[in-house]
Image: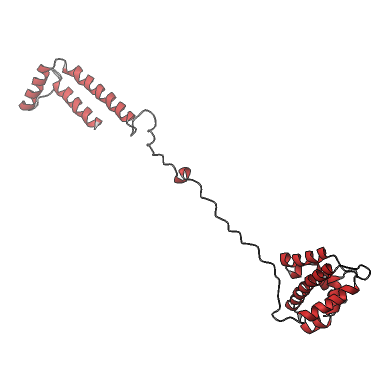
Amino acid sequence: MLLTLSLVLLLVHFVTKKGGGKSVPNAWQSLVELIYDFVPNLEYFVYVIFFVVCFSAGDVATCDGVGGVEGPPSPPVVGIRVAPEVWELPPAAPEVWELPPAAPEVPVLAQQLIPDPQRESELYSRFLVNTIGENPTLRRITETISVQNEIERLIEAALVRSGFNPTRILENRHRIRGFVFYPRGRALSLRQYRSHLQSIYRLGTRDTRAFQRLMTAVRNYDLWL
């Protein structure tokens, strides 16, 4: 575009130059003479317009960021987009459900190996033997036999659940009572027997000391079940 404008202005200069131009068609010569009469010193005016146009075009081209002679092109404007996660709240931690602790395993036999009256009678006789010289009170005897009766029934059920033969358990019940109720050959206090019973319901029968004493006796061949 700039080159075309320069060529046109140069052509006008040569046409309008006094004394140097060749003859041209009358219509064109009349237009040139009219312009020349209207604007004195047209030659210098043409040069001024040419340089003004050149410098103006260069400034505009340089400032608009598209091109130009001076300096590199301006970088394009890029929009800034904030990532959504910058403004969003962090995800909540997954809720953890804690399972309740498993209930202690306390097996119970649907049918007892021996009736309660027979069991209580045998426990009473054994208790009197193992408390000779102590003269226990009637209250201690009664409550001890009641607690021993319940412990023995739960121990027998745990043995059956563990796979031992019920007949062998019944045949060795007197020896089992010695390991469970009289580990040192003498009767324990009523408080100790009650603590054994509570530990069965708190820990499970097979996790009590009394049951573990039986398992140790079986492993050592002190008790054949």
Q: Residue furthest right?
A: 133
Instruction: Looking at the picture, tell me which residue is in the foreground, 225 or 46.
Output: 225
Side of 222 relative to 1 (left or right): right
Outermost residue to the top: 40
> Residue 113, relative to residue 27: is it above or below?
below
100 shown above or below 72: below
Instruction: Name which quarter of the figure residue 135 lies in.
Output: bottom right
Give the image location of residue 131, x and y in percent. Answer: 90, 70
The C terminus sits in image quarter: bottom right
Left or right: where does residue 190 sit relative to residue 18? right
Can you say whether 191 is above or below 90 in the image? Answer: below
Q: Nearer the viewer, residue 146 or 89?
A: 146
> Quadrant location of residue 105?
bottom right
Is residue 223 visible to the viewer in this orientation of the structure?
no
Left or right of residue 214, residue 18 in this image: left
**Picture coordinates of residue 76 (x, y %)?**
37, 37
For image coordinates 81% across by 71% down, the residue present is 142
Which residue shows up at 22% across the image and 21% down it? Answer: 49
Query: Residue 151: x percent and y percent?
Result: 77, 72
User: Residue at point 93% right, 71% down?
Assistant: 132
User: Considering the image in quadrants, where does the N terminus appear?
Assistant: top left
User: Residue 64: x, y in percent?
Assistant: 32, 31
* Most distant residue in the front direction: 138
Judge whether residue 30 can be spotted in this image: yes
